[in-house]
Image (cartoon, helix red, strand yellow):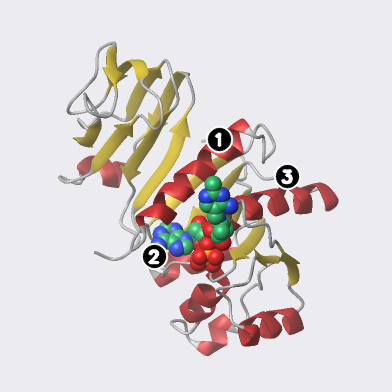
Amino acid sequence: MHNKPSLRYAVLILNRPISQEEAFMKNFWEKATLRITVDGGALRWDQFLTRLPEEISNKMKIPDLITGDFDSITEETLQKYKKKGCKVVHTPDQDYTDFTKALKELNNHCQEHTIEVDNVIAIGQASGRLDQILGNIQTLYLAEKQHLLHPETKLYLMSGDSLSWLLEPGNHIISIPEETRKHNRAWCSLVPIGETCHSVTTSGLMWNLDNQSLKFGELVSTSNAFDGSDTVKIKCSHTILWSMKVPSLTGE
Ligand SMILES: Nc1ncnc2c1ncn2[C@@H]1O[C@H](COP(=O)(O)OP(=O)(O)OP(=O)(O)O)[C@@H](O)[C@H]1O
Ligand SMILES: Cc1ncc(C[n+]2csc(CCO)c2C)c(N)n1
């Protein structure tokens, strides 16, 4: 047995209902190195806390940072968290989404406080507004292309029991949790966003690709599945969006 390196991560709460199971979300929040709520995300966090017994929610850590253009958070909630001592950063720029701006503030905060995180996990149901969902994918791209985060920091979007991130050109090995492998409807997908991925080769999937091209209007690998292997291996020539089911965090 060897010790796993400690996981340093930041959690970002976007403006969607938090569908994660209470025990998971509570631990995930408490163990984070940094906690950020993005605009209306502060309301969602506040609502989530009402699902926990008061003696527990009262003892929980407060957000380190509340950001946004503040068109969604209520003044009451903003003041409540200010009083608790949360740092508030207003990001009024209307050329970037609050999620994108929150990543910049996260990076500033890390530099100011000499904090390092290996992973940033943004939590928010992908639902309702397709433009916001696509905007969130654009943020994944901007984080990479505009170096919004430390080059070693990975960014993930968690929506209910689905986890998504970008696979940059090259080779990737993804460990598949046992619970996902055994689940008979565990899905995954490889989606080329904005450009053709000229060559993709995979192993560990129900529908593997062999030096094939992914392109909208031609081939896009949605509703793929795992073949039971411990890992999925992917070689891609261009950036693609990988999404997969993670162990149920919703009790479903
Ligand atoms: N329907 C949705 N689906 C997915 N993500 C969403 C949705 N609505 C909001 N979000 C995420 O939560 C963040 C904060 O949402 P909020 O509603 O406060 O922002 P907004 O003012 O409507 O839009 P923007 O974030 O672009 O300024 C958004 O930047 C986005 O990442
Ligand atoms: C070409 C272009 N399209 C849309 C917007 C609008 N916009 C994009 S992000 C954002 C913030 C939302 O809270 C707003 C209003 C823009 N600025 N530029």
Q: Which mark is residue 20?
A: 2
Amino acid beneath label 3? Glu
Can residue 13 be seen from the camera position used here? Answer: no
Estimate the spatial distance between the alpha carbons at disc 2 and disc 1, rounded to whole Å.
30 Å
Amino acid beneath label 1? His
Estimate the spatial distance between the alpha carbons at disc 3 and disc 2, rounded to whole Å.
26 Å
Question: 244 or 7, which lies in front?
Answer: 244
Residue 232 position (above or below residue 12): above
Q: Secondary structure at mark 1?
A: loop
Q: Secondary structure at mark 3?
A: loop
Q: Secondary structure at mark 2?
A: loop
Other-residue count near label 3 (Cα within 10 Å), few / some / many at <14 / 14–19 / ≥20: some
Name the quadrant containing residue 182.
top left
Q: Which mark is residue 172?
A: none
Foreground disc of the pair 2, 1: 2
137 to the left or right of 65: left
Earlier in the chain: of badge 3 and badge 1, it is 1
Earlier in the chain: of badge 3 and badge 2, it is 2
Quadrant in which the C terminus is drawn? bottom left
Q: Which residue is mark 3?
A: 116
List x then y, in percent, for residue 23.
Answer: 43, 69
